[in-house]
Image (cartoon, helix red, strand yellow):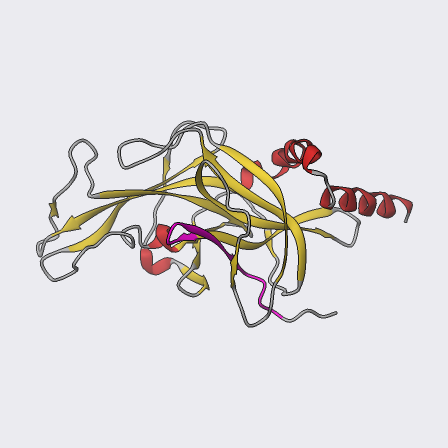
Amino acid sequence: MKMRKIVIALLMCLLHLSVYSQDIAGSLIEKAIKKGFVLLRQDYQLLNEDDEPIDNKSGVDCYGRTYTCGVRVESDQFLVTKDFVSPWTGESIVISERRHPEISYTGFMELSTIDFEQIDFEVEDAMDAVENHIYSVAASEVEGFSIDDVAGRKKGYAVWLKSANAFSLSKAPTGLSLEIVTFNITTKETEFVYDVPNQPKGNVIGGAFLVPSINSVGKILLKVNGVFEKRGGVWKLISLGTEESDD
């Protein structure tokens, strides 16, 4: 019982950090969550009626490429945004029998490595987590976070995956790092899209909202309550916490 009180006290301290000490907290928890975030890459081509590539960009063997953040959850899943499932969403592509986009390469890279590892991905295999916003993809070989699907008052951390450089079709993100800041919000059962008052700075790839939870043996767990999605140049929180609380 005494140990449980110590763990709870530590948790409360982490949740009420001053701005001065946020960097210290970030470094303490980054090691615990680093494996849970990956950089995802999707290449896509435009194909003609014979499924042959057309209009590939010079030097990259594809028409377009996106870099997004993947969050490991459960035993083998990545949580991803729509930009991963449909990387051509932001393009003005007129789709017809003579011209249609198709994914040509999918890969992921962990924060501690420098190379992408190719994975198998079929769009039809992506499962809705939040319809038209967040999807789960069975492509992770490492167990990830649990999901917090309960609505209510949440105190936790916004975790942003960032690149040291501006990235583009021909220039991959490098110097990957996680920025961890306290983030508090009250979610409702009937809503899932929320504003992010303090927009992140720098070359942001994506991120997730993690909330601490204490299990039956007094161990602190971090659960995913939502994923950050960028639309119209603004980051929004897409919350997974839409279930009614038992309290």
Q: Is residue 232 magenta?
A: yes
Residue at (30%, 50%) from the top-left corner? Answer: 87
Report whether 13 appears left or right of 176: right
Q: Note whether 190 is above or below 77 in the view shown.
A: below
Q: Residue furthest toward the right? A: 2
Question: Looking at the figure, which quarter contains the C terminus?
Answer: bottom right
Where residue 242 appears, as percent x and y from the top left, is 57, 67
Residue at (61%, 49%) from the top-left corner? Answer: 210
Residue at (37%, 54%) from the top-left corner? Answer: 232
Q: Note whether 24 is above or below 65 in the view shown.
A: above
Where residue 32 appears, as percent x and y from the top left, is 63, 37
Residue 179 picture quarter? top right
Marker count (numbered): 0
Residue at (69%, 33%) from the top-left corner? Answer: 20
Report whether 5 appears left or right of 143: right
Q: Note whether 163 is above or below 228 in the view shown.
A: above
Q: Relative to the observer, which residue lies in front, 17 or 41?
A: 17
Where residue 72 appears, as percent x and y from the top left, is 52, 47
Report whether 58 appears left or right of 212: left
Where residue 40 appears, as percent x and y from the top left, is 39, 42
Q: Is residue 80 magenta?
A: no
Residue 163 picture quarter? top left
Report whether 81 appears left or right of 217: left
Identify the magenta region: 230-243
Q: Note whether 140 is above or below 111 in the view shown.
A: below
